[in-house]
Image: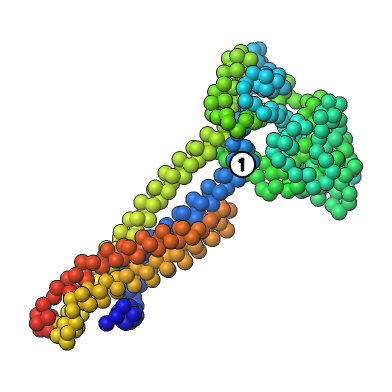
Amino acid sequence: MNLRESFVSALNNLAAHKLRSLLTMLGMIFGVGAVIAMLSIGAGAERQAMELIDRMGLRNVLVRDVDLSEDELNEIRRNSLGVSLRDANVISDGIPGVELVVPRVEIDSYKIMSVGGRTAASVLGVSWRQRELSDLGVAEGRFIDRLDEDRHAQVAVIGAGVRRDLFGVAAALGGQLKINDVWFEVVGVLEDLGGGGQFQGVDIGTTATEIYVPVTTAIRKFDRPPLRAPVDEIVVQLESDRSAQASAVAIRRLLERIHGGEDDFELVVPEALLDQSRATQRLFNIVMGCIAGISLLVGGIGITNIMLATVLERTREIGIRRAVGARRREIRNQFMIEAFAISLIGGLAGVAMGVVIARVVAASAGWETVVTASSILLSTSVSMAAGLVSGIYPATRASQLDPIEALRYE
């Protein structure tokens, strides 16, 4: 009997006992499905993390104002103004390997309107170099320039969503919008970079719902609570050969001296966040891999158990085949192929189950999932290997049966 005939025979034997075969395959189905789902969720999380990290910048160090209580701020403000433009200038002059230092001010807006509509958006005072830092694309008009910043100009660059809300199909360039009680002229519309998100507790907005004005205008034209720091965030971009984590240590030491030792700022290092995310992802993969491995182990034990029962049931058949000339190797191969067929079919069903789980998770929980060819190949390979290993003992036992004793078996 050749391999093709053995495989067809194995499928026929499985079809003759459909329920038993299905129950035997469940371990493989759940194990492979768990591997596919786990790897797809992990790959999706990693892709999303990389996209958010890319927006934050691997070569960047973020200096951020810390949200403190009023009592704490009353005490701290005796020694420190908080994060300010002075910090930006000191970092630019005192830290080696700095390419850009870009301050950002968040404006508390309670009203954003134009003649034709209203909207809700994040209003940010930014440097004219923000476009260079964030690689912002401008779909219409221009971005803020140095002259706007020097003159405290009342100009604004708006996101695509803001443009739709305020101007609809009308021309946005040259249009007027009002933020709180200050009017601005629209000089540019940003390209839509997609949705924002949160990574390791750091919020990353989407440009579609953002409005940019010159940072000097934001500081001069809008009131801020007296105890609040003048600047909310300073982004420091380093040269490519500089370590962000090492530079962050130097920046912290420098700012601690300027702030009189007060802990009224925090440093966010995307490079360190990425390392932490990868470590967490590895731990997640190990835990989920162990769970999936246990499922495959249980599935393998199930295959061994059912194949031993099959050998017992077919003892007389084995005796007849041996009597008409079948060799031990052919008997062994027959049962090995049956075990392999169980694991193969279970593995393929598990792949389908894993893909469905990944899609359901993506649709219901809003998590991005990525089913890769490597995850399918890995899970099915492990499944088939487990089937082969599980079939070795029953197949060997079947091949070693004494033909005479087998023929006498009732």
Measured along the vertical axis of the image, is residue 275 above or below residue 161? above
- Figure quadrant of residue 90: top right
Image quarter hosting the N terminus: bottom left
Q: Can residue 111 be seen in the rendering of this structure? A: no
The secondary structure type at the circle numbered 1 is helix
Q: As shown in the figure, which amino acid type bears the numbered disc 1?
A: Asp
**In the drawing, does residue 136 fall left or right of residue 260?**
right
Measured along the vertical axis of the image, is residue 283 above or below residue 404? above
Residue 241: % across, % down: 58, 31
Residue 12: % across, % down: 33, 82
Task: Please give the count of numbered marks on the rendered protein.
Answer: 1
**In the drawing, does residue 27 fall left or right of residue 245?**
left
Residue under the point 80% across and 38% down: 143
Where is mark 1, residue-wise? 54
Residue 391: % across, % down: 26, 68
Nearest the viewer among 365 and 133 is: 133
Nearest the viewer among 291 and 339 is: 339
Measured along the vertical axis of the image, is residue 362 above or below residue 48? below
Nearest the viewer among 105 and 399 is: 399
Residue under the point 87% across and 35% down: 183
Q: Can residue 90 be seen in the rendering of this structure? A: yes
Residue 207: % across, % down: 72, 43
